[in-house]
Amino acid sequence: MNTPIAFIIFKRPHTTEKVFEIIRQAKPPKLFVIADGPRSDRPDEAEKCEATRAIIEKVDWDCQVLKNYSSINLGCAKRVSSGLDWVFNNVEEAIILEDDCIPHPSFFPFCEELLEKYRHDTRIGSITGQNVQFGRERTNYSYYFSRYNHCWGWATWKRAWQYFDFQMQLWSEVKEKNLLEDILQSTEAVNYWHNILQSTYEGKIDSWALRWTLACWLQSSLCIISNLNLVSNVGFDQEGTHTLSKKSKFANIPAEEMSFPLKHPPFLLQNRQADIFTQRTLYSKPLIVSLKKKVKQMINVG
């Protein structure tokens, strides 16, 4: 393996250990570790953060380990985005994993091959191993193209990340000119994304991923999505930030093995059928409700 991995951790040593073991098998030459600090009002969190960071000390292969550890709690949006800024100030491309996303080992060569193939193709903004089609194979090829840039195990380039804007400075213009209509071409989708992006802009939702989605849309970037699910999110519990319900149908979807050589599609077009399904399942009103409940919980605890 030649591609650096960026590993985002916080306070969950039990899931971090599982992801770390898969990374250890892949043996990346360079490992960037991004860690948030404990919250001052959670007395047990400092110990959990320390136990999680201790796992990184188990690196036992030829690897340059670079650490970006925050002593204070920055929150999900600022910690991840500032951490990725740091990563892409150092390298041109990276594979990115969070501490609750366990990939199949074939996820790494899948990302690596496509990072190289589309390195200079600005139509592509990211690559992901997360597939939420629940067994529906949308293509006869190894992957398809989507307007949704899933982030449970993904990869991107510095050339794409440069457009990330934490402040969402163009959001006012997007609203004023109804640009979501042009992007999404669906009243249902426009209403959903307008509400959730507005809540993010107002600071009611602590998400870097929603800001990243908007940045990609504003560059007309597509995401490569594997035709099989290559990453299992095991973080659906009370320790999660946005993934609280163990009963979610998106929890613990098994990670499958990608076959090689990859079958590359001879065209580059959005798979609308897959995206409509994703919009109506993953991106639906219940998700907005759950995110708002989480924000209220955080406020009440504070």
Image (cartoon, helix red, strand yellow):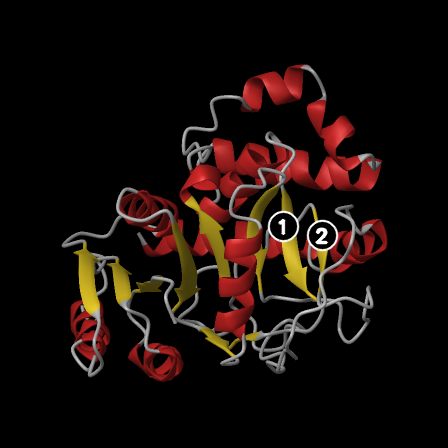
* Disc 1 element: strand
Give how far apart the Cα atoms at labels 1 and 2 are. Answer: 6 Å
* Relative height, residue 271 to residue 99 (above, below): above
- Disc 2 marks a residue whose amino acid type is Phe
Nearest the viewer among 286 and 55 is 55
Q: Residues within 10 Å of mark 2 (few under 14, many from 20)?
A: many
Q: Position of residue 261 (x, y in %)?
A: 65, 74
* Disc 2 element: strand
Residue under pointer 1: 223
Q: Is residue 2 left or right of residue 205?
A: left
Nearest the viewer among 110 and 214 is 110
At 42% across and 65% down in the image, what residue appears?
Answer: 97
Q: Position of residue 209 (x, y in %)?
A: 50, 48
Q: Position of residue 50 (x, y in %)?
A: 16, 72
- Disc 1 marks a residue whose amino acid type is Cys
Name which quarter of the figure residue 256 lies in: bottom right
Q: Which mark is residue 145?
A: 2
At 54% across and 78% down in the image, what residue appears?
Answer: 106
Sequence-wise, the earlier of marks 1 and 2 is 2
* Relative height, residue 30 to residue 159 (above, below): below
Name which quarter of the figure residue 38 lies in: bottom left
